[in-house]
Amino acid sequence: MADVKLDPAESFADFKFYEYESFPQRDVRVANLSCWDDKLKCVGYEGGAGIGFEFRRGQNKPKTEWINANTLRVYASAGKLAGVKRGNKYRMQHNYYEMGGLLLNNNEHTTLRNVNIFSCPGQAIVFRGAQKYTYLKKVSVDVPEGVARRPLSSTADHLIFSQSAGFVKLEDCDFGFGCDDCINMHDNSLFMCAYSEKSLRTRNNRNENLYRPGETLELRYGDYSPTGVVAKVVEVRVLDAKKKILEVEFDRKLPEEKFGGFILFNTKYGTRNVIVRNCYFHQNRARGVLILAKDVTIENCRFYHNEMGAIKIETGYTYTSWCEGYGVKNVLIRNNTFDTSNPLGVKNGGKERDVYISIYMRSDPSNSFTDYPIISDILFEGNTFKDSFGLIAYAANANNLSFIKNTFVNPTPRKNALAYRGSFQLLNCKNVVIADNVWVDSPNLSEVGVFVSPSEKDEVSLSNNKIVTK
């Protein structure tokens, strides 16, 4: 960062490409900026921040101009540039969601073995359609060793399940230095409102391929509880072309709307039966692994310096953008190491965390609650959490959640010493067990505990947890 001016009338930041005397590409797209840790040579550090611009080509494009051969001036609001400081270094992405690398679409019994992806504009590996029975062995999405000026691998997710039929195994894979999540496993869902006795009204045309005539959809109420109805699409009509609102007609009478509308799952898909073993997820923008799936095992893996947190378990829908996940059930996270998670300090409920477990409804994020157990049966066992910045886990709207025989070690002091470091936050959770865990005593811990409202304390069982001196 060469200079910054914060002024309501005109604000800008000057970014100097310090490795070049003259930057060779003059028509530069500024997709995203991530704060750069020059010591670790990766993004994310305590107190840092990123700045998003043209994630999708042509959208939210900032005004720019070259003020000399290697310095680009980027104009933005004072609020957007508030965290920018002169002398800070950033990784500027010139791409984000672009072509992608490998697309696995509607295949069965597919193996990728000994595959290295060193550079990719977009998501490196994409599962789409009813992709089923997939095995990745020693697959790497990472920067090549010994190559200068290579600050990233993929410009978006390393591996994303945008839709699948499940049954996936990953072993000995290495995902690092990408610009989004290492793994994002989910299925796209839909949100619609009642329109007639047999039809629903969309809020936009997002995920239109999921409700073409002939597709079969399961209807859930707006709180994720089942309606008991599975119906086939017979016709799709345009109601408002300008706003891209459609009418979707089904082959039977639909139930009465509850909780603001219906969430719909295409029965052709369902990401489940996923095993991730002996893998390394590291030094990336965003999270290590997102789990929006059922019957998932993550074991003997290493998570290091995942900028926005190590594990995110969720399901949710919004009115305007994404609707993702058919629910989370039967997840085992065992014998993994989590090291320096969430250096960017992303918060939920006002607290930083390594692990996030919750739902979102109507908007993302949200503080919505549901009594239906759409997220349930999750066990963290035998893991080591090292150098957390804040909470071990923030969990809301989860049922049958257990943390058993985990070890928490915090030898490194933080610039922003948080009293709740190494603790848990629980909201609207049922049947929670926290047992046989060990905290290694450290001057960096002060008020370790479990934060829960008095009305919900009977839902939490605590036993045989201890602080030990080493």
Image (cartoon, rainbow, N blue to C red):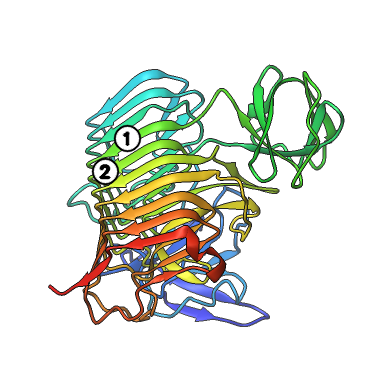
Which residue extends farthest left?
470
Disc assigned to residue 275 = 1
Q: Quadrant of the C terminus?
A: bottom left
Q: Which residue appears at 37% of the width and 69% of the height?
A: 423
x, y percent for residue 195: 85, 35
The answer to which quarter of the image holds residue 386 is bottom left
Locate residue 306, reporting x and y percent: 35, 58
Badge 2 vs badge 1, beta-carbon distance below 8 Å: yes
Q: Position of residue 404 (x, y in %)?
A: 30, 54
Figure check: 192 above or below 21: above
Check disc 1 and give the amino acid type: Ile
**Nearer-the-camera pick, 4 or 441:** 441
Q: Residues within 10 Å of mark 1 (few under 14, many from 20)?
A: some
Which label was assigned to residue 354?
none
Q: Amino acid at mark 2?
A: Glu
Which residue shows up at 23% across the image and 55% down it?
A: 148
Q: Depth check: 88 or 271 in front?
A: 271
Residue for badge 2 = 299
Image check: 405 left or right of 451?
left
Kindly report the distance in space between the C-alpha atoms of the residues bearing marks 2 and 1. 8 Å
Residue at (53% x, 35% y) in the render:
187
Which quarter of the image is occupied by the N terminus? bottom left
**Residue 60 showing in the rendered view:** yes
Q: Residue at x 29, y 34 (%)?
A: 170
Residue situated in front as seen by the camera: 81 or 67: 81
Q: What percent of the width, then of the height, locates residue 32?
A: 49, 58
Label located before the other in sequence (2 or 1):
1
Q: Quadrant of residue 276?
A: top left
